Image: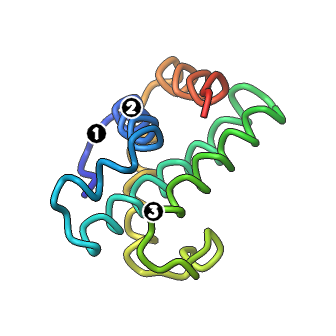
Amino acid sequence: MIKTISLRNLLGLTLAAAVSQAALASDGLTAEEANEIIKEDIAATQVMAEVCPAIIGQNAKFDANIQVLVKTYLADYSDKSASYQSLQSDAQYKSFLEESREAAKQSSKEEQKSVCEDVLNFEG
């Protein structure tokens, strides 16, 4: 679970997970553990979508990259009927979302800008 980590570390985890979701299955994680990681990743991505437009402005490529990240994570979620929308009412997801928002608040503007640029330049 996300504790007090920087937004930069959060993004590093998020982007690394996006390109290696297959690692979840091969790491011997239970479906529940893998789902928790996926929820954390989606929550971090949602926070980036909330924070970054104020920093880098509205950007279609950024928005598209956010959608790619969310879709990539959901593809490995054990409940194939789950959606980004359905997660919004999940209690555990809400907790991860609040933790991600807190991590974003505690990060510097420079760090936030760097994270936003990383998402903008992400090649999924």
Q: Quadrant of residue 9?
A: top left
**Amino acid, disc 1:** Ile
Q: Would residue 117 be found to the left or right of residue 2 on screen?
A: right
**Amino acid, disc 2:** Gly
At 75% from the left and 42% from the top, the residue drawn is: 63
| Mark positioned earlier in the residue sequence (1 or 2) | 1
- List x then y, in percent, for residue 12: 39, 31
Q: How is the image coloured?
A: rainbow
At 53% from the left and 77% from the top, the residue drawn is: 80
Dot 1, how many residues are within 10 Å of its Cα: few (below 14), some (14-19), or many (20+)? some
| 99, above or below 116, in the image | below
Q: Which residue is mark 3?
A: 76
Q: Would residue 11 be found to the left or right of residue 70 on screen?
A: left
| Mark positioned earlier in the residue sequence (1 or 3) | 1
Q: Quadrant of residue 113?
A: top right
Q: Which residue is mark 2?
A: 12
Residue 112 showing in the rendered view? yes
Q: Quadrant of residue 33?
A: bottom left
Q: Which residue is mark 1?
A: 5
Q: Label 3 near label 2: C-beta < 8 Å?
A: no
In the foreground, 28 or 82: 28
Q: Determine the CA span between mark 2 and mark 3.
A: 19 Å
Which structural element holds mark 3? loop
Q: Label 2 near label 1: C-beta < 8 Å?
A: no
Which structural element holds mark 2? helix
